[in-house]
Structures are given as C-alpha cells and as structure tokens.
Image: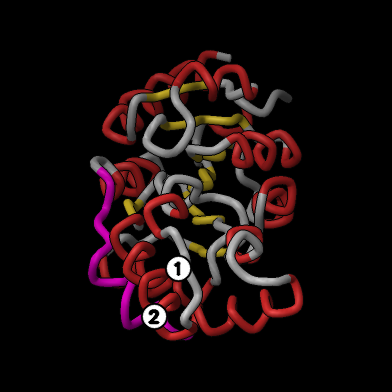
C-alpha cells in the first residue's frame, strides 16, 4: 500500500511552527534585543530573524563564545515569554490549515525546533489548536516525532523541514513564507511548494481525492 493510499480517510499532517504557522520575527527580534541589553553583548537582531529555523544554540554561537552558549540560550528562553509571545502573529491561512486537516478527519501535529514550552505559549496565544506538539527537534530529528505520530505529510518553510519529511518517509509540502523562496525549496527536494498556507486546504482536498482514487 502506498503512503498516499493509506491517507485517504484520515491524514496525519505535521506542521513546522516559525515562518510556517506563525510570523515570530517581531517577537524574536524583541527577545534578542532584550538579551543584548541584559548581557551587554552586541546582537544583530535584524540579521538573526532572517535565518530562523535551526536550533537556537546555532544562532547564539554567532554572538557568544562557545562556553557561554548554553547559559545564554537558557537566559533567552527565560526572557522569551515576556518579549516574544504577544508580538507574534499567525501567518495567513494558519488556522484554516489546521482546521482543514481536522475537517478531513485527520490529525495535526506541530513539530518544531523551538523550545516546546515557548512553542505551546505561541499556539495558545494565537488560538491555533493542533492535536499534538513536539519541540526541540531540528531537520532529520523531526522524523522522530513525525514517525511517532504516523505523519503522512510534513509542512514547513525551510530546507531542514524537507530533510525532516524525507527522513520520516513523509510527503514534503513547503510554503515560501520563510527564508527560502519557491525555487530554493524545489531545489532542496520539496515534493510540493505552495505560496503560503492559504493554498493548503485546496491542495489537501486534491491530495485526498487522488488518494481515494489510488
């Protein structure tokens, strides 16, 4: 049985968080600014928010010596609820994408590299209600949660999301709302490239109709 055929009645769809479901750039910018002020360390927050996706410690390594990175990452995470939640917006179509999966009789799971408690704060604040959430996972590590939840599709905005979908044996659906444009996502190996999540419900309908005929 093919992956598509197995999804005809109840798809399980994974979603990335930052720049897929939410535009967290304003909040993350504010948090980096607060961290710079707190530590007296120069951080180019404008630059940092252009490369969201990889784990926090990778960005921290650009501004702090290696021995300080774990401590600074912990401090950033502690500041995050006060600075980053209210400034973050849902991207167009985010709630509707989650709803489309539910209306199709399926389940949605958010799988993100973000610290899970802070990811949950974002979802609760914005009223986005997936069936499950898994945090602290990046690129191929995302396959751990995707396989655990039996995800047939993984939706993201970054080449790391494509890698995660591939590692899980899931269809890689991408949106060009993050740091990668449509051509770059195709080059990274995405199976499907959408402009944004407003196109996702229509795509899902077509995908499930094709699955039912398979």
Earlier-in-chain disc, 2 versus 1: 2
Q: Residue at x 58, y 65 (%)?
A: 63
* Quarter the N terminus occupies: top right
> Tag 2's secondary structure?
helix
Q: How is the image coloured?
A: secondary structure
Q: Is residue 71 above or below residue 124?
A: below
Residue 146 is situated, as x and y percent measured from the top left of the image, at 65, 50
Q: Residue at x 61, y 17 (%)?
A: 187
Q: Residue at x 54, y 38 (%)?
A: 158
Q: Is residue 77 above or below residue 111?
A: below
* Towards the viewer: 142 or 170: 142
> Tag 1's secondary structure?
helix
- Quarter-of-image position of residue 126: bottom left
Nearer mark to the viewer, of 2 and 1? 2
- Identify residue for label 2: 37
Q: CA distance from mark 2 to mark 1?
A: 24 Å
Q: Residue at x 37, y 49 (%)?
A: 21
User: Residue 119: which disc?
Assistant: 1
**Disc count in the image?**
2
- Crowdedness near tag 2: few (<14), some (14–19) or many (≥20) residues, C-alpha within 10 Å: few
- Crowdedness near tag 1: few (<14), some (14–19) or many (≥20) residues, C-alpha within 10 Å: many
Residue 30 is situated, as x and y percent measured from the top left of the image, at 32, 69
Residue 176 is situated, as x and y percent measured from the top left of the image, at 40, 30
Residue 110 is situated, as x and y percent measured from the top left of the image, at 50, 56
User: Residue 181: which disc?
Assistant: none
Q: Find the magenta span and give its range.
A: 78-91
């Amino acid at each position: 049985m093919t992956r598509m055929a197995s999804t005809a009645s109840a798809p399980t769809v994974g979603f990335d968080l930052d720049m897929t479901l939410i535009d967290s750039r304003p909040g993350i910018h504010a948090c980096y600014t607060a961290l710079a002020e707190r530590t007296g360390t120069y951080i180019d927050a404008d630059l940092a928010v252009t490369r969201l996706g990889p784990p926090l410690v990778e960005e921290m390594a650009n501004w702090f010596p290696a021995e300080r990175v774990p401590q600074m990452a912990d401090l950033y995470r502690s500041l995050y609820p006060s600075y980053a939640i209210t400034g973050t917006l849902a991207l167009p179509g985010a709630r509707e994408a989650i709803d489309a999966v539910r209306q199709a009789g399926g389940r949605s799971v958010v799988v993100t590299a973000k610290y899970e408690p802070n990811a949950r704060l974002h979802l609760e604040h914005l009223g986005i209600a997936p069936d499950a959430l898994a945090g602290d996972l990046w690129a191929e590590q995302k396959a751990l949660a995707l396989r655990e939840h039996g995800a047939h599709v993984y939706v993201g905005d970054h080449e790391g999301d494509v890698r995660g979908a591939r590692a899980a044996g899931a269809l890689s659906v991408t949106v060009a709302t993050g740091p990668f444009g449509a051509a770059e996502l195709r080059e990274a190996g995405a199976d499907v490239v959408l402009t944004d999540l407003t196109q996702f419900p229509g795509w899902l309908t077509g995908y499930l109709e094709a699955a039912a005929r398979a």
